[in-house]
Amino acid sequence: MKAFSVNKQTIMKVNKEKLDQLIKKSKKNTQWKDLAEKELNSGGWIDRSFEIALTVLEKLDEDGITPSTLAKRMNCSRQYLNKLLKGRENLTLETIDKLENALNTRIIAVCGFVDSEWHRIDKKIRTSSFNQVSFKYEQVEKEMKYSETRTHDLKTSNKSYDFKAA
């Protein structure tokens, strides 16, 4: 019986060593699992990040701009820009804005504004220090509303009006 016990212990020791080796190998190759899990849990931002990276790369190629030049324009390191251009970085609005300004192009549209430039102009007019321009803008809006109301009143009134050309 002792011979069998020794063999059993030896076999268990060998199996444990093999198991330890397999565990070590599996730990080394979990990077792809981590990336896959990260992508599944990202909520879609990785896809958008990748699309933005492709858009930036196309714009660089189109305009003949080097990544080093873009990094200087963005006031960031070349290494950070490389990280962005891989399409796996969770981009902030600030970073996207820097990319847009450095490339002089629009990368994303925000909040469904068809032409956000007109929205910006409208906002500048309303909040500008040029009170006269702002005042005139407000007056035109009021007159248009009054005119629409007056036209509606004329159409719904029982009175008849005879307009003659002067």
Image (cartoon, grey):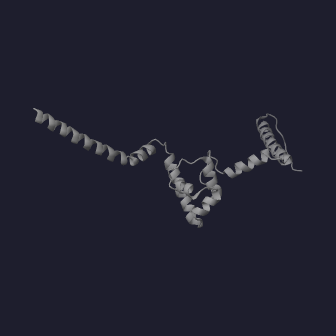
Rendered residue at 76%/35% (across/down) = 156
* Front-lying residue, 144 or 166: 144
User: Residue farthest to the top?
Assistant: 1
Rendered residue at 56%/48% (across/down) = 91
In x, y percent, where is residue 58? 54, 61
Horizontally, is 155 left or right of 43 in the view?
A: right
- The answer, for residue 103, to whether it is visible in the render is no
* Front-lying residue, 108 or 85: 85
* Front-lying residue, 116 or 147: 116
- The answer, for residue 145, to whether it is visible in the render is yes
User: Residue farthest to the left?
Assistant: 1
Rendered residue at 59%/47% (across/down) = 92
Name above or below for residue 89 compared with residue 16.
below
Horizontally, is 88 left or right of 108 in the view?
A: left
Rendered residue at 29%/45% (across/down) = 21
In x, y percent, where is residue 4? 12, 35
Which quarter of the rendered picture does the N terminus lie within? top left
Give the total number of marks visible in the rendering: 0
